[in-house]
């Protein structure tokens, strides 16, 4: 019963977090995206990393386009997740602008045939989207679960 209660609580937090971010005016969200990207670019973990796994924003998530553009200018290797069956995912480095398609959950994902698979041990920094935080400050994502 405790697991079911926790699942319901997380679901409520997720819905509230998504509703809150989607209710923000677009200009305020864009300004927040720029500040978040600037903060990420300034952190030591970013400076030290050469291979970064990030995400293509969807549903009002923080847009990392400015972050990604600067990281590419600095010669960082960027890879993105591609959902696979069985709650697994690959990290793929798109090789060009035609390396994208709509993937699982209607999120842009790299096309495997036009991308390079990056082994997990080569990823040095991972950026993940967040819908909300629970009372213990743990991330509440969009509801997908990886094993």
Image (spheres, rainbow, N blue to C red):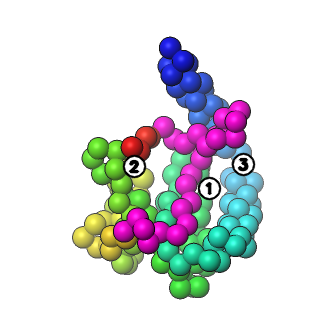
At horizontal 35% and vertical 60% (from top left) the residue drawn is 90
Q: Which residue carries the number 1 mark?
A: 62
Mark nearer the viewer, 3 or 2? 2
Q: Earlier in the sequence, mark 3 or mark 2?
A: 3
Whether residue 99 can be seen here: no
Quadrant location of residue 15?
top right
Which segment did they paint magenta?
119-143
In the image, residue 130 lies in the stretch drawn in magenta: yes
Disc 1 is placed on an element classified as loop
Q: Residue furthest left?
A: 113
Q: Which mark is residue 106?
A: 2
Going from the N terminus, do you reach mark 1 or mark 2 first?
1
Among the 4 quarters of the image, the one containing residue 134: top right
* Main secondary structure along the magenta-highlighted residues: loop
Counting from the top left corner in percent of width and height, residue 106 is at 39, 49
Q: Which residue is mark 3?
A: 25
Q: Residue at the spot x=48%, y=37% of the render?
A: 143
Q: Can residue 84 be seen in this snapshot?
A: yes
Whole-percent x, y for residue 113 in the image = 24, 70
Foreground mark, 3 or 1, reads 1
Please tell me which of labels 3 and 1 falls first in the chain: 3
Residue visible at 37% across and 70% down?
Answer: 118
């Amino acid at each position: 019963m405790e697991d079911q209660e926790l699942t319901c609580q997380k679901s409520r937090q997720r819905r509230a977090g998504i509703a809150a971010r989607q209710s923000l005016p677009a200009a305020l969200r864009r300004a927040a995206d720029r500040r978040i990207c600037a903060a990420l670019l300034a952190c030591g973990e970013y400076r030290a990393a050469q291979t970064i796994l990030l995400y293509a924003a969807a549903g009002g998530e923080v847009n990392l386009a400015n972050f990604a553009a600067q990281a590419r200018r600095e010669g960082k290797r960027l890879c993105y997740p591609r959902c696979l069956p069985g709650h697994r995912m690959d990290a793929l480095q798109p090789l060009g602008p035609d390396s994208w398609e709509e993937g699982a959950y209607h999120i842009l994902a790299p096309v495997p045939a036009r991308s390079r698979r990056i082994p997990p041990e080569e990823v040095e920094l991972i950026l993940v989207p967040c819908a909300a935080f629970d009372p213990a400050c743990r991330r509440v994502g969009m509801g997908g679960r990886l094993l």
